[in-house]
Image (cartoon, rainbow, N blue to C red):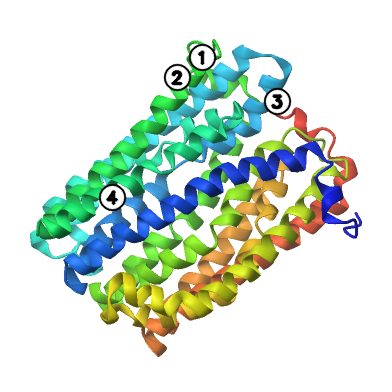
């Protein structure tokens, strides 16, 4: 487990090269997407008052938050069970896996949309959405079924088409930037920006589905998107346990951002929610390399034997590189964050930089800890991951309420830092336990086999 080898020797490992290559694909498109996203946010921030910009953020956050709660991590399920099946040449099992995932996406998406539409009128004013904007917010909720669908992402990852995912990642920010510029220069106001964000989200999601369908056809895999739950759920050992566990874990954590915005909006008003959104957007952009490494890291280690030292060594190497990138980004954010925010959004949003400075304190932790969740899934310890994320999210929620009450918008930033650190700590403990017991994990990779 030594990490003292020169970095150039790390690239003699073909799996490590694949992880870096796929992360590079995603990273190049995310960089472009982040710049386009800043253009879109700048147009919205300058084209509306801070209060209206905050309402737009709250509408988007509500739909995203509902989607995050009901969303199953079907892409992880496809990678976990589909990658071994594809490696064995078992196309029938791969069809079961993708059909089961598609069925879950359909069911959870429409249930989420119905729940979001029913609940919204009762909670709108409490979360900062005025009664006159409820109708347009309900329209935005019709995006929940496409927001929650992760099946096409899983298909493209299993088929090693990270290049197509990279292209798709630029669709939504590009359309938001173009539509935002039209709304800004055309003085279309609040309705124009809401419509732009709506159409951009819809187009990006549909583009991903189109790519997945075309790739399945190209590889001659037919009937892979025939939805089914009961039959495939019986034939794939451990399917329901895996999807429910990962759903609960990610519903808790994926809702972090949207629900944070809603809590800030409810306690401090829409303008503060807009400031928090700007700071969180910059932080998310700064931490994207970790997310990209995770997306390429997870499929590769699922093909490895967890009882060997190989995946664990890959995790250490990937974490070191990601942490070093995080340190560099941290310095860039501290030096350049304030002028960028002032230039892009205007001086009235400079208060967001104070939040950003607080959040960046946790950047290196976020970057270096990205392999932990993937390692737990590889080791069959998804329930430990769920417990860790649940405890961390609960601690974050409590701190968010308490610190906002004590320190206002600054308290939201402090709570964000604490939440990130809690998540890393609670993930690290079961990961160390899984590593110590790795020699008893040989049976784990066979869990996806048919019963």
Closest to the observer: 258 or 332? 332
Residue 84's label in the rendered image is 3
Q: Which residue reaches farthest bottom?
A: 406
x and y percent of residue 154 in the render?
54, 33
- Specify which label sits upstream in the sequence, 4 or 2: 4
The residue indicated by pointer 4 is: 176
Do the CB atoms of the residues marked 3 and 1 lie less than 8 Å apart? no
Do the CB atoms of the residues marked 2 and 1 lie less than 8 Å apart? yes
Question: Is residue 416 left or right of 433 when viewed as pictured?
Answer: left
The residue indicated by pointer 2 is: 214
Residue appearing at x 28%, y 64% in the figure:
42
**Callout 2: SS:** helix
Closest to the observer: 142 or 220? 220
Separation of residues labelled 3 and 2 (CA atoms): 22 Å
Separation of residues labelled 2 and 1 (CA atoms): 6 Å
- Specify which label sits upstream in the sequence, 3 or 1: 3
């Amino acid at each position: 487990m030594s990490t003292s080898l020169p970095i150039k020797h790390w690239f003699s490992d073909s799996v490590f090269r694949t992880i870096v290559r796929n992360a590079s694909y995603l990273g190049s498109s995310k960089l472009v997407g982040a710049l386009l996203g800043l253009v879109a946010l700048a147009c919205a921030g300058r084209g509306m008052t801070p209060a209206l910009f905050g309402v737009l953020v709250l509408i988007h956050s509500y739909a995203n938050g509902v989607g995050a709660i009901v969303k199953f991590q079907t892409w992880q399920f496809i990678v976990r069970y589909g990658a071994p099946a594809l490696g064995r040449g078992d196309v029938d099992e791969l069809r079961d896996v993708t059909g089961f995932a598609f069925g879950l996406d359909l069911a959870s998406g429409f249930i989420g949309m119905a729940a979001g539409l029913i609940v919204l009128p009762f909670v709108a004013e409490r979360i900062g959405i005025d009664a006159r904007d409820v109708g347009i917010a309900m329209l935005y909720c019709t995006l929940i079924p496409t927001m929650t669908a992760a099946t096409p992402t899983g298909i493209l990852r299993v088929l090693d088409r990270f290049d197509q995912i990279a292209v798709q990642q630029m669709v939504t920010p590009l359309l938001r930037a173009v539509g935002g510029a039209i709304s800004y220069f055309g003085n279309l106001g609040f309705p124009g920006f809401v419509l732009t964000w709506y159409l951009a989200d819809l187009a990006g999601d549909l583009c991903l589905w189109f790519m997945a369908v075309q790739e399945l056809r190209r590889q001659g895999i037919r009937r892979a998107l025939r939805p089914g739950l009961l039959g495939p759920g019986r034939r794939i050992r451990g399917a329901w346990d895996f999807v429910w566990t990962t759903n609960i874990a990610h519903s808790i954590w994926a809702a972090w951002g949207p629900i944070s915005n809603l809590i800030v909006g409810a306690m401090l008003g829409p303008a503060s929610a807009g400031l928090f959104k700007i700071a969180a957007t910059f932080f998310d952009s700064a931490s994207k390399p970790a997310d990209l490494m995770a997306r390429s890291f997870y499929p590769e280690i699922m093909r490895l034997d967890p009882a060997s030292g190989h995946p664990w060594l890959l995790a250490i190497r990937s974490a070191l590189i990601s942490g070093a990138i995080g340190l560099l980004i941290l310095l860039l954010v501290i030096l350049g964050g304030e002028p960028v925010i002032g230039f892009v959004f205007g001086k009235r949003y400079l208060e967001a930089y104070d939040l950003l400075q607080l959040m960046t304190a946790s950047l290196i932790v976020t970057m270096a800890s990205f392999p932990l969740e993937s390692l737990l899934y590889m080791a069959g310890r998804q329930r430990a991951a769920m417990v860790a994320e649940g405890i961390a999210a609960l601690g974050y929620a409590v701190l968010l309420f308490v610190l906002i009450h004590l320190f206002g918008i600054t308290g939201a930033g402090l709570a964000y830092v604490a939440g990130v650190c809690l998540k890393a700590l609670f993930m690290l403990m079961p990961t160390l336990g899984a590593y110590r017991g790795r020699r008893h994990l040989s049976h784990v990779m066979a869990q996806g086999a048919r019963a």
